[in-house]
Image: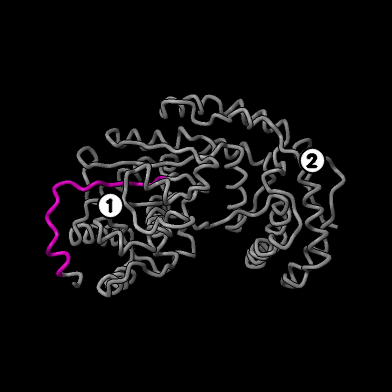
C-alpha cells in the first residue's frame, strides 16, 4: 500500500498527543534522535510522527515509506531535524547567533513549520514527537521561543495535549561532559574551575531556569523528569524515553546504541589547549584523532579523573543545593540521591593522567595526527603545578 492510500484509510483524530524532549544536553539526546529518525517509517505506520524539516528529506522519506522500508538512512538534518529547527528559531530571534554549519541547506523557519504542519495534516498521527536538546536553551534566551514553537506547529498553548520530557545529570558530571562537548564544537574554553561562574548563569547549571520557563509558558503541559544515572545510561535513552512516556517505539530490541561519546578526561586539557593554539579545522581534527586513539591508550577509567578540585566542588555543591531542592519538589522525591558526591574529589589528578596520555601519544601515535597537530603535541610539557583545583594554572603548558 502506497503512502497516499495508507493515509486515506486513517481515521480522523480529534486529539493528537504531542511529546517534546527538551533536553538536557549530553543525556543521550543524540542516541534518542538517531533512533527516532532511523525508525521513523516504522513509527509512522504505528501512528507516531517524527517530522522532517526540509522538503528534500521529506521527499526521500516518502519514497522509503512507499517502498515499505522500516528504517531510513541518517544525515545530520534527518536525525537532528529539531535541533536544526531550534537553531533556526534562535537565529531569527538573535541574528548574531548563527545556525551551526553542520546544518546546511535549511529552509526558513516558517517553511520548516509549514512542512511539519503539512505532515501532521497528511499523516494524522496520534502522537507527534519532537526531540531537541537545543530546546533546553529557550527559557534563558527568551520564553517567547517556546510560544513560537507551539504556535508554529499550529497548536493551542492551552488546549493541546503537550507533554515535556527532560533528562538531567548530576551537575559535576554533567558540566564535565558539556565542557568536552564545547571542545568538540571547536570553542575556546578556560579550564573547568574558571568556567564554573559562566555556567552558573545559564541553563547548564540552573536546571530550574531551564525547566520553569517551559512550565510558565505551558502551564497545562505534563513534565516528566528523569535522572540520567547509571541505570538509565545502561538502559539507553530511546528505551528509557519510550517507557517513561508510555510510547510504543519500534526498534528497541537488542543492546542500545551509543552516540556522541565524550572525550576521556585525561585528554581534555590536550584538546583544550589545542583549540587555542591551532586553526579551527586542525583543532577539530586533533579532537577527533584523540577520540579515535582512546581505546589504544592505557588510561584509567575516565570517571576516576578529577577535573574540579576541592574548592570548586564545594562551591558547586553549595550553589546547586537550592536548585536541587526545587527539582526534588517537582520530582516528588530526592532527585539525585548521590548529591553529596558533588563535594567529593575523584581519586586521580588530571595532571598525572594527562602527562601519562601525552607520553603514550608521543611514543607510539604521533603519526595519527596532522603535521600541525604533531608540532603542537611536541611542544606541550607537563606543568609542575599541583592539580588545577588547587591553583588556576593549566595542567599542560607550552614547552
- Residue tagged 2: 387
Secondary structure beneath label 1: strand
Badge count:
2
Q: Position of residue 74 (x, y in %)?
A: 42, 67
Q: Nearer the viewer, residue 229 or 360?
A: 229
Disc 2 or 1, which lies upstream in sequence? 1
Magenta region: which residues?
5-22
The quarter of the image holding the C terminus is bottom right
Viewer-side residue, 333 vs 234: 234
Q: The N terminus is located in which quarter? A: bottom left
Picture disc at residue 119: none
Residue 370 x, y percent position in the rendering: 72, 72
- Disc assigned to residue 128: 1
Viewer-closest of 148 and 59: 59
User: What residue is at 27 percent from the left and 47 percent from the top?
Assistant: 18
Q: Residue at horizontal 43%, vertical 54%?
A: 32
Q: Quadrant of residue 140?
A: top left
| Placement of 232 over or under 103, stated as above or below | above
Provide residue 390's location: percent of width, then percent of height. Answer: 78, 35
2 vs 1, front mark: 1
- Membership of 213 in magenta stretch: no
Task: Tell me the element at label 2.
Answer: loop
In-image side of 377 versus 71 (left or right): right
Residue 13 painted magenta: yes
Name which residue lies at 25% across and 73% down.
66
Q: CA distance from mark 2 to mark 1?
A: 48 Å
**Residue 39 left/right relative to 156:** right
Amino acid at each position: 500500500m502506497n503512502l497516499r492510500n495508507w493515509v486515506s484509510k486513517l481515521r480522523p483524530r480529534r486529539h493528537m498527543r504531542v511529546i517534546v524532549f527538551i533536553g538536557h544536553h549530553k543525556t543521550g539526546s543524540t542516541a534518542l534522535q538517531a533512533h527516532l529518525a532511523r525508525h521513523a517509517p516504522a513509527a509512522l505506520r504505528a501512528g507516531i510522527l517524527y517530522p522532517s524539516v526540509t522538503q528534500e528529506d521529506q521527499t526521500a522519506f516518502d519514497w522509503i515509506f512507499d517502498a515499505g522500508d522500516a528504517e531510513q538512512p541518517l544525515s545530520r538534518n534527518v536525525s537532528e531535524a529539531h535541533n536544526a529547527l531550534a537553531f533556526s528559531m534562535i537565529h531569527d530571534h538573535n541574528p548574531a547567533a548563527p545556525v551551526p554549519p553542520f546544518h546546511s541547506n535549511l529552509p526558513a523557519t516558517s517553511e520548516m513549520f509549514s512542512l511539519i504542519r503539512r505532515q501532521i495534516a497528511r499523516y494524522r498521527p496520534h502522537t507527534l514527537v519532537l526531540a531537541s536538546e537545543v530546546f533546553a536553551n529557550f527559557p534563558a534566551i527568551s520564553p517567547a521561543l517556546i510560544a513560537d514553537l507551539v504556535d508554529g506547529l499550529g497548536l493551542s498553548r492551552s488546549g493541546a495535549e503537550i507533554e515535556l520530557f527532560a533528562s538531567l545529570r548530576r551537575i559535576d558530571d554533567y558540566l564535565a561532559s558539556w565542557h568536552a562537548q564545547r571542545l568538540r564544537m571547536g570553542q575556546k574554553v578556560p579550564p573547568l574551575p574558571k568556567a564554573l561562574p559562566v555556567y552558573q548563569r545559564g541553563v547548564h547549571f540552573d536546571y530550574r531556569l531551564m525547566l520553569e520557563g517551559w512550565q510558565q509558558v505551558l502551564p497545562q503541559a505534563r513534565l516528566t523528569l528523569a535522572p540520567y544515572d547509571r541505570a538509565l545510561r545502561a538502559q539507553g535513552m530511546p528505551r528509557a524515553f519510550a517507557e517513561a512516556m508510555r510510547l510504543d517505539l519500534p526498534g528497541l530490541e537488542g543492546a542500545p546504541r551509543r552516540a556522541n561519546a565524550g572525550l576521556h578526561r585525561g585528554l581534555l586539557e590536550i584538546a583544550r589547549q589545542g583549540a587555542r593554539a591551532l586553526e579551527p579545522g586542525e583543532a577539530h581534527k586533533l579532537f577527533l584523532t584523540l577520540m579515535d586513539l582512546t581505546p589504544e591508550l592505557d588510561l584509567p577509567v575516565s570517571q576516576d579523573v578529577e577535573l574540579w578540585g576541592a574548592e570548586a566542588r564545594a562551591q558547586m555543591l553549595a550553589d546547586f543545593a537550592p536548585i536541587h531542592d526545587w527539582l526534588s519538589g517537582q520530582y516528588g522525591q530526592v532527585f539525585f540521591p548521590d548529591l553529596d558526591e558533588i563535594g567529593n574529589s575523584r581519586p586521580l589528578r588530571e595532571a598525572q593522567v594527562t602527562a601519562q596520555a601525552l607520553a603514550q601519544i608521543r611514543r607510539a601515535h604521533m603519526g595519527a595526527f596532522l603535521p600541525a597537530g604533531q608540532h603542537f603535541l611536541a611542544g606541550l610539557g607537563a606543568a609542575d603545578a599541583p592539580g588545577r583545583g588547587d591553583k588556576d594554572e593549566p595542567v599542560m603548558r607550552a614547552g
